Amino acid sequence: MDIHTDAHSFSQMIQAIPLLNDDKPVSIPALKASCAACSMHQLCLPMGLADADIDRLDKIIGRRRRLAKDDALYRAGEPFRNLYAVRFGHFKTYQVNAAGEAQITGFQMAGELLGMDAISGDRYRCDAVALEDSEVCEIPFGNLEELFGQVPTLLRHFHRIMSSEITREQNVMLLLGNMRAEQRFAVFLVNKSARYAARGYSPTSFQLRMSREDIGNYLGLTIESVSRLLSRFKKMGLVAIDKREVTLLDLVRLKAMAAGTEQCSPMA
Amino acid sequence: MDIHTDAHSFSQMIQAIPLLNDDKPVSIPALKASCAACSMHQLCLPMGLADADIDRLDKIIGRRRRLAKDDALYRAGEPFRNLYAVRFGHFKTYQVNAAGEAQITGFQMAGELLGMDAISGDRYRCDAVALEDSEVCEIPFGNLEELFGQVPTLLRHFHRIMSSEITREQNVMLLLGNMRAEQRFAVFLVNKSARYAARGYSPTSFQLRMSREDIGNYLGLTIESVSRLLSRFKKMGLVAIDKREVTLLDLVRLKAMAAGTEQCSPMA
DNA sequence: CGCGGAATTGAAAATACTCAAAATTAGTGG
DNA sequence: CCACTAATTTTGAGTATTTTCAATTCCGCG
């Protein structure tokens, strides 16, 4: 309901952001992306590509899309045309079952690819929603497929990305299938830590972009359990938390808990 | 311990199976596969390929491998060279965490592809173990990648297969994240039913190839819970079971339970 | 026929959930 | 900018589903 206001203030904010395109004139409002200039190109699809090949990739990349908090990038059932690479901001993807209950299947951050689950059915399989004001590169999949024939390095990297997504999901299955609540939560925090570290941010201090409810849903726990877990971790000196700003005070112990080597007292 | 005996009797059995290769002389003991002649080629990698392209695929396919029950097709940590397509038999794949606990991430049957999670790390990420005497086609991934450049249809289908694997795992996340035990088990049965139906087998009567323990592990439940569930379903007239031979007596109601539309009484 | 692994069943315990209320935070309008 | 309202989060108490531990039973196999 108040998304409109958000979107408006966000579009004002956008004006202030310097455009990174410099190679060619920018057509407004359809911003074109430039992988070479993107800070995420070491993590994203163009990883490891020669400059010439990055240019070819740039040519097929569609416009950028900006989304305000709570905007849907796509929704389950919509026809699949594009993959999306997150430029900045954060997203969540979730599936909705027949009974209308949602399961969050992932949280995505800058440099990560969205929409790969849609390739097989020609329709998006889940909803992708921005957790904050965000920007993505639109990657028309048909064009990408054509490019695969010309840039084998790109194809190989794409396969690696899809493969890691499979691996990531297997790790979540492991988490949901045989970890207790406290271990799940430790894994969650340590995983966030590592991903921020990979992007040059602090591994011990970051903002949780999602609500407690989202965390709980992702971890297969209720919001109350997440809240209690957080309180307990705080009491144990493992973390400090102010609103959604987390500081990991004892990353060593958190990692041990995530690995299952160490455990703390019951919920009490 | 009696695996050796199994393997021996199995290798005897193998002698009796007529070889399907006819194009060229078969080098023994490295059996070559022929996709065109394979009963699974409508479900497997060659799906939708023109005859000429199937031939090209055949040329790169490595030997067939036969495995006795409990044999490992590959183990986590081994270098990744091949994908494997199941010709007949059943497999399970499982990950082992730092604490040594396993989580089964999938059960694979004829026509399904194994090893896709290994592409990103150049090593297998999980163990793949035969649930019964089985056979796979070895698909050297390097060769497959070369073929992708020449057979775009094959590439597209490969992407669809990887994408469906992502989708499948998302569905398991949904199952583990927010379903009660009885719903999980109903989903499990209905899923098996559909996959057998797709292969021309009865959707209402089939053998569970895995132990109760494997089922429990996969569903995030204990073996005791699975056993109780089975007893309850039997008492309700939903299924009949003799050892590992299941008959689904009320597929409609099972589907409703799987969808979350209907639920039965608590564990009592 | 007896051994051993797998499966079933029962009783007790524990983890996490539900329901409910209070406290905190974010958003909105004056 | 502040105050008010709505939403989110925290905390508590009681409950329920599933687990754990233990004892049988069932079956395949030697």
Image (tube, coloured by chain):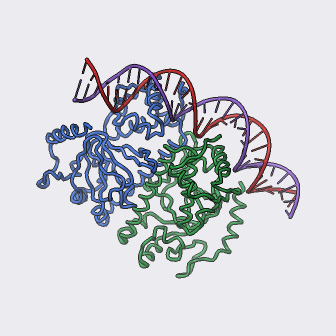
Chain colours: A green, B blue, C red, D purple
Quadrant where the C terminus of chain A sits is: top right
Going 40% across and 36% down the picture, which residue do you hit? Answer: B213
Q: Percent position (x, y) of residue C4? A: 32, 30
**Residue B157 makes an appearance in the image:** no
User: Is residue B194 depicted above or below B160 in this figure?
Assistant: above
Going 54% across and 30% down the picture, which residue do you hit? Answer: B263
Q: Is residue B91 left or right of residue B27?
A: right
Q: Percent position (x, y) of residue B4? A: 22, 40
**Residue B252 makes an appearance in the image:** yes
Q: Percent position (x, y) of residue B7? A: 21, 40
Q: Quadrant of residue A167?
A: bottom left
User: Is residue B213 depicted above or below A108 in this figure?
Assistant: above
Going 42% across and 48% down the picture, which residue do you hit? Answer: B96
Q: Percent position (x, y) of residue A255? A: 54, 55
Identify the residue at the far left of this view. B25
Q: Is residue A156 left or right of residue C24?
A: left
User: Is residue B184 depicted above or below A245 in this figure?
Assistant: above
Quadrant where the N terminus of chain A sits is: bottom right
Numbered-mark total: 0
Q: Nearer the viewer, residue A220 or D29?
A: D29
Q: Nearer the viewer, residue A114 or B141?
A: B141
Q: Is residue B226 left or right of residue B48?
A: right
Q: Nearer the viewer, residue B95 or B246?
A: B95
